[in-house]
Image (cartoon, helix red, strand yellow):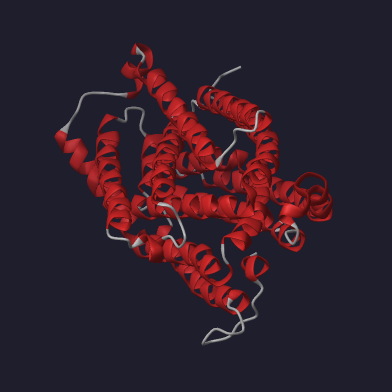
Amino acid sequence: MDRFSVKRRYAATLVTNLFNLAAGVVNSLIVPLALGPAAYGSYQFLSKSFGLMLGCSNMSLSSALFTRSSRETESTNVLVVFGAWVALQTVLLAVIVLVAVLFDLKRWMFPAQLSLIIVLVALSEWANYLAANALQFGESKAESLFVQRISLIAGALKMLVIAILFGIGRLTLTSFIFVNFVGAVFSVLCIARFFLQRENRDKYFGAFDALKVRACGRYFVAFCSPLVVYQAAGFFCAYFDRWFLMIAAGAVQQGLFSLSFQWSGVCLLFTSAMTNIAMREASFSFGQGDFVRLRNIYRRVFRMTLMASGCLAVYMALQAPTIIALFLKSKYSGAEHVAMIMAFYPIFAGIEALNSSFFYGTEQVKTYRNIAILMMGVGIAITYVFVAPANFLIPGLGLAGAGVA
């Protein structure tokens, strides 16, 4: 069977995501239990914050890279532009961390967080950002079989090390961050080695061409410029949720919400198996003008996403109290209602991810931006009303983690 076929690539991605589903379940039980709600909440707050910073400063260039790389066999000049931007992102992230730590701005940006942990989590998220883009580049070249195999191996090694550390009582916040960092670096190096082999290097990378680099730069600007406001609004909205919960309710409530969010993310691993492949095929079909195939792909993936996420949501909502009582015991008492609410999040997140991939794949970015920004504004207002305590200047319902959920 052709290793580039959609069915085989989807099968490889699905197998990897099913393993990640199992690994995510284990990690969402072991790690919160070992770290405790406060430390786990602090890690999740920092992890999401730096992830959002990298995502915002990315300016949707990853999507532009994916779309362009899916249509062109040789990608040297595209990667030159993208690599230069990643270098700028790295410098920006380093400046933010250093300023926050050295000038004591961390108490406002990262409330109640230690300087060492801030630096370590920033490094870990940077490595994971590189790994995610390396994986996505492999998907754009229809090399799903290899990159998903690397993802599977990295996930298995991480799960094994975490289980061993937990078993010997050495799973701490710093050791957990270190394992995540090493796992991401391993993925990046393996994928880089694969594409630098002679056969793949000759196939996917041509000669450097300054004119083509400028053309790629213009394409990236045209693709991403409508999304600058969207990226900034998205960062503010998502960061506000986590930051305001930390300010209004503290690290323990952050931990209860993060646990539930982690479980909902585990469910998304199953429904997201087709997202990158669907985006690649949507971009390819759109470029070929094959709108019948484009429509059929959307219909099939939409139905699969809705059915799979709906079944998982109902199951997780019913089982959440039992799982917490059996495995996490009194440490996470109070997380039951948050987990039950968040169980239904993957239904809408999966469909949103599918929709965004088709908007990006067909270059309808302005329409997507307008819809998203409108709903972000509504989301911030709702978060404040549900989370703010009654003693705030503008009182809210004080639902803490359940309010964010």
In the rendered image of this protein, does residue 367 appear above or below residue 83? Answer: below
Residue 35 in sight here: yes
- Residue 255 is situated, as x and y percent measured from the top left of the image, at 62, 56
Residue 152 percent location from the top left of the image: 59, 26
Whole-percent x, y for residue 380 in the image: 52, 73
The single residue placed furthest to the top in the displayed view is 198
Closer to the camera in the image, 292 or 298: 298
347 or 180, which lies in front? 180
Image quadrant holding the N terminus, namely top right
Horizontal side, residue 132 vs residue 323: left or right:
left
Residue, x 63% and y 26% (percent of image)? 160
Name the residue located 35 percent from the left edge and 32 percent from the top edge: 72
Q: Quadrant of residue 193?
A: top left
Q: Give percent across and percent down for residue 58.
A: 35, 50
Q: Is residue 102 left or right of residue 119?
A: left
> In the shown orientation, is residue 130 left or right of residue 42?
left
Q: What quarter of the picture does the C terminus occupy?
A: bottom right
221 on left or right of 14: left
Q: Is residue 366 visible?
A: no
Residue depicted at x 71% and y 52%:
306
In the figure, 156 relative to 322: above or below? above
Position of residue 305 relative to residue 233, above or below, is: above
